[in-house]
Image (spheres, coloured by chain):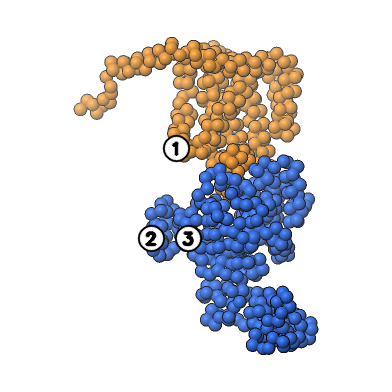
Amino acid sequence: MEWLYNFPSMDIESLRALKKGIDSGFRGFTREYGVYIENAFEPLKQFLIWSERFMLDTPWPLIILLIAVITWVASRNKRIVIGTVITLLLIGYFDMWEDTMQTISMIFVCTVLSIVVGIPIGIAMSRSDRLQSVVNPILDVMQTMPSFVYLIPVVMLLGIGKVPGLIAVVIYAIPPIIRLTNLGIRLVDKDVLEAADAFGSSSWQRLKNVQMPLALPTMMAGINQTIMMALAMVVVASMIGVRGLGQPVLQAINNQYFSLGLFNGLAIVGIAIIFDRTSQAYGKRLQKYQEVVHG
Amino acid sequence: MVDDKASPGISVRNLYKIFGKDPEKYIDLVKQGMTKTELNDKHGHVLGLKDINIDMPAGGIQVVMGLSGSGKSTLIRHINRLIDPTAGEVLVGDVDVCQMNPAQLQEFRRHETAMVFQKFALLPHRTVMDNTVYGLEVQGVSRSEQLERAQRWIDRVGLTGFESNYPNQLSGGMQQRVGLARALTNDAPILLMDEAFSALDPLIRMDMQSVLLGLQKEIKKTVVFITHDLDEALRLGDKIAILRDGEVVQQGTGQHIVLNPADEYISSFVREVNRGRVVLVQTIMDTSVGLENREGPAIKIGTTLEKAAKIMTDGNSSMAHVVDAQGKMLGSLDIQAVISSMVTPISHDDPVAAE
Ligand SMILES: Nc1ncnc2c1ncn2[C@@H]1O[C@H](COP(=O)(O)OP(=O)(O)OP(=O)(O)O)[C@@H](O)[C@H]1O
Ligand SMILES: [Mg+2]
């Protein structure tokens, strides 16, 4: 009756062998192809370095002005712009400017990459039920897998640094944009699509003139979530050498510096709110045509 | 492809449409006479259209009537193949739309057809102007030409000044007119109009009917027009087909249907119609009188009874004679007969001789 109380598990020797097999297989793969993979990501690395250098080398008043202009163009909301400027000034005053700029630059690159990769996948999913039924479970796994687990294979492949951090963040943050692109396109009114067909739209014209514009507000909600998730993951990714606001937080945890953790934590909250409000206001503005309802 | 200049006729041949998971499986049962209700109750499939045969006149207006759910929208969607038939063919000119490959179909839709939708189906994120140019934009016409051609129709449907409004900002009737302008701007030889005037108020509706009839005088398009309104059908239709439960129950000219309703269903349709505007003088004229007996004013063949009565009362005469285009006498008219034909209620049991 012993098997009732102890789960009849695989014996320890075979289990060890299995794990060892997987690990050594992956290591072999890394030794074989690691260099090529690293080279393939070289352009991304250049982009990251360029964006970080831009944020750090530009005089801070210009950066504040630039961010204020971007938030204004996106949101057309004075309160959001003023809140943004005050937040940035406070961050600078408490000597977190450099870390914050690195984090913003990282989020920027991650978001661009997620959009560039995620939207085409979302479009492809919306066109094929089969693809959707394959991709959806993968996205589920990506979203529920503890984020630390991503770091392991990425570090094994590419070592410690910016690019592996970027990849880990993108893998973690990309599901919402894929899901909501797919959803937004599938929700487009059938009557409107029929009209587009009746006038002889090609499938590209259909996508460009009808599906994308009508799905855009939903896609914006996805981009907003992606940004928020990227921001959360950037802190975790500091464990593998992504620089920015995450590193002081990590340091604070290791050394029990409460105030250091608190300040940097608040700075992260601050830029999270800026990103969130701005992208949401932009999403709302995209739906302007729906607001002015007749009668 | 169909010739661009003259509008082609459309022949619908043995067209069947079954909605559901596995339409092919039931097509034979339906061909053997299974009814819509039976198919729905026993097999959970909806019979949309059953053995439709209609020859729509080239350069003329074909009206399709029928109660809600009788299959009108389903039928009109087969003409530009927004719906694929379960069986049968749709010939435009001598090309079968159902056999076109995707590229041919796209060409056909771009250049040969334009459609007005029952539910308007405007692009909500585009302004009135950008909706109206849509067909031309898809064709790749230059922007300046798009704007010019669209503006003409926006003006004509009475939406001048609303060019940069979004559909949501317009009333139902105005939205319908945007749909109308969008279709007319396309300037295609075939115009498919699914209850295109149903949301319009009576004045604008009359005006739009005149636009359509005026358009038919200049450039003869082949128009398929769906309506619930018999008066509208009689005013516009060169030919009328009446559907019930996906089947054609009667087709012919308006006068023919009003005078010879095929069954009680159609009688109930035509009972309330203003016959004075439908029945023509040659239908009731007396041809037994001597052909030299030219009494009263001359009335041209093809005149409605209502107009004839007006001419006769204006001329204060109780008799008139009907002449053809060359002025040759065809028969005589008596005011008594004119008035009684205008008011006789119709039941399908006592048909009056027509045409
Ligand atoms: N996609 C579909 N799937 C299943 N049944 C359908 C579909 N489209 C139409 N039908 C059915 O076909 C029949 C005819 O519908 P259709 O829309 O052609 O009617 P209609 O004559 O245009 O009515 P209305 O005057 O209300 O517009 C209805 O019974 C409807 O339920
Ligand atoms: Mg309909």
Image coordinates of residue B12 in percent, x first then y, are 52, 59
Name the element at disc 3.
strand
Question: Is ligand 1 less than 8 Å from the beta carbon at label 2?
Answer: no
Location of the C terminus of chain A by quadrant is bottom right
Closest to the observer: A197 or A209? A197
Image coordinates of residue A266 in percent, x first then y, are 62, 22
Disc 3 residue type (three-letter): Asn
Disc 2 residue type (three-letter): Leu
Q: Which residue is mark 3?
A: B14
Disc 1 residue type (three-letter): Arg
Q: Are marks 3 and 2 in contact (CB under 8 Å)?
A: no
x 40%, y 12%: residue: A28
Q: Is residue B151 above or below residue A150?
A: below
Q: Which residue is mark 1?
A: A130
Q: Is residue A265 above or below residue A195?
A: above
Location of the N terminus of chain A by quadrant is top left
Question: Mark 2 or mark 3, which is nearer the start of the sequence?
Answer: 3
The chain letter under disc 3 is B
The chain letter under disc 2 is B
Image coordinates of residue A93 in percent, x first then y, are 71, 17
x 71%, y 62%: residue: B217
Name the element at disc 2.
helix
Colour of chain B, in one word, is: blue
The chain letter under disc 1 is A
Label 1 and label 2: CA atoms lie apart by: 33 Å
| Letter of the chain shown orange in the rendering | A
Would you identify the image quadrant in which residue B219 lies?
bottom right
